[in-house]
Image: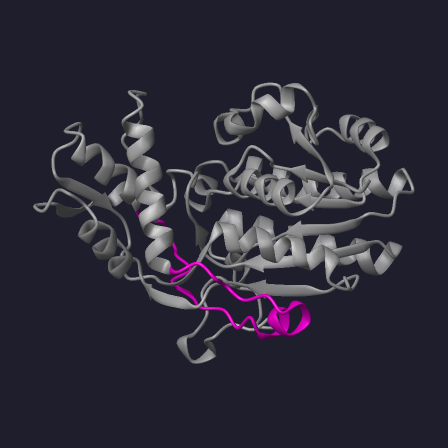
Amino acid sequence: MKSAFITGITGMVGSHLADYLLENTDWNIYGLVRWNDRMDNIEHLMDRINIKDRVELVYGDINDLSSLLSVFGKTKPDYVFHLAAQSYPKTSFDSPLETLETNILGTAKVLDAIKKLNLNPVIHVCASSEVFGRVPREMLPIHEDVGFHPASPYAISKVGTDLIGRFYAEAYGMTVMTTRMFTHTGPRRGDVFAESTFAKQIAMIEAGILPPVIKVGNLDSLRTWSDVRDAVRAYYLLVTKSPISGEYYNIGGSFTCTIRDMLNHLISLSTCKNIQIEIDPERLRPIDADLQVPDIKKFKDHTGWEPQISFEKTMKDLLDYWRSQVNSNRKFLVR
């Protein structure tokens, strides 16, 4: 039986990828976790994890080569999905060195461990659309070979991630492919991202925890939106549909609007009809990647993938997720 190894299984994307693989394949799944990782996003899998029913957690850290040599040596996976990262652009301005170390050196260590063990899995290295940064409007939609102009330490780190993945493919003949996933969201999205913090604030307003005011940052950025459940289906096709070593792909949705339009849509779904908007200077980045519209023809032509879940369903499911979290009587930071 084949097996998949997921770094970042406790994140939004990693947990949804585990769900997808459990439902749509017969693969065994190994998820890399650190001893202090939060398990909220995979809590629904705990019964299976506890009896190792096709999903097993292995302990290590992408910044610790010795632990990676140990876990890859034991699991010998057929597929590796490298999703683990410091993935918050705004946070990267406060912690640039941690971001660079985790995302660049961590990726190098993952790939080097696999190389040192002489394993030959199909490897997905997850970069980011943030590598393109500040793109002139006349260059939209963004195709794969648009030059990089990163606009945050996070984006710089993902340029490194992207290039390291391609380097290991070209230099060592490893089957590594890199993706630049554009904005993707849905249930379990971290609350440091715009649409998720908006949905969380709305849920807290509806519950009477906050006054009817949503704190926002830059609302003028243009985004193409996709659903995380479409994203993980794309990642599955990436590694199974005639994988080509060294290739790199843009992946994204089909619905484009500004952050402001997205926020207005979320507010329209609320049971509270008097919500106001207030700019919070702390939510503004020093510099922003404000035009994120992808050309995904290359990936669609190679895999046949198409986004299936509508923007409206994604936003409703995200808001319902935060309603369920808020109504669970847990305490949340207001951010």
Residue 307: say if magenta. yes
What residue appears at the point 22 percent right and 40 percent down from the top-left corner?
A: 202
On the rendered image, what quadrant is the N terminus found in? top right
Q: Nearer the viewer, residue 26 or 280?
A: 26
Relative to 226, 33 lies left or right: right
Left or right: 174, with 21 as reference point: right
Q: Quadrant of residue 66?
A: top right
Split into 4 quadrants, where in the image is the C terminus? top left
* Residue 65 location (% of width, % of height): 77, 31
Residue 104 x %, y %: 66, 44
Residue 316 falls inside the magenta stretch = no
Q: Position of residue 278 (x, y in %)?
A: 16, 46
What residue do we see at 57% from left, 40% from top? 19
Who's the residue at 42% across and 47% down the image?
186
Is residue 34 visible to the viewer in this orientation of the structure?
Answer: no
Q: How is the image coloured?
A: one colour
Q: Nearer the viewer, residue 108 or 254?
A: 254
Left or right of residue 202, residue 87 in this image: right
Q: Is residue 285 above or below residue 292?
A: above
Asked whether the viewer can see residue 115, the reply is yes
Which residues fall within the magenta stretch? Answer: 284-310
Instruction: Decide which of 58, 286 is in the foreground and name it.
Output: 58
Q: Position of residue 102 (x, y in %)?
A: 62, 37
Residue 321, above or below 59: below
Residue 27 placement, left or right of 101: right
Q: Main SS of the magenta segment?
A: loop
Instruction: Give the residue at the far left of this rendering.
Output: 274
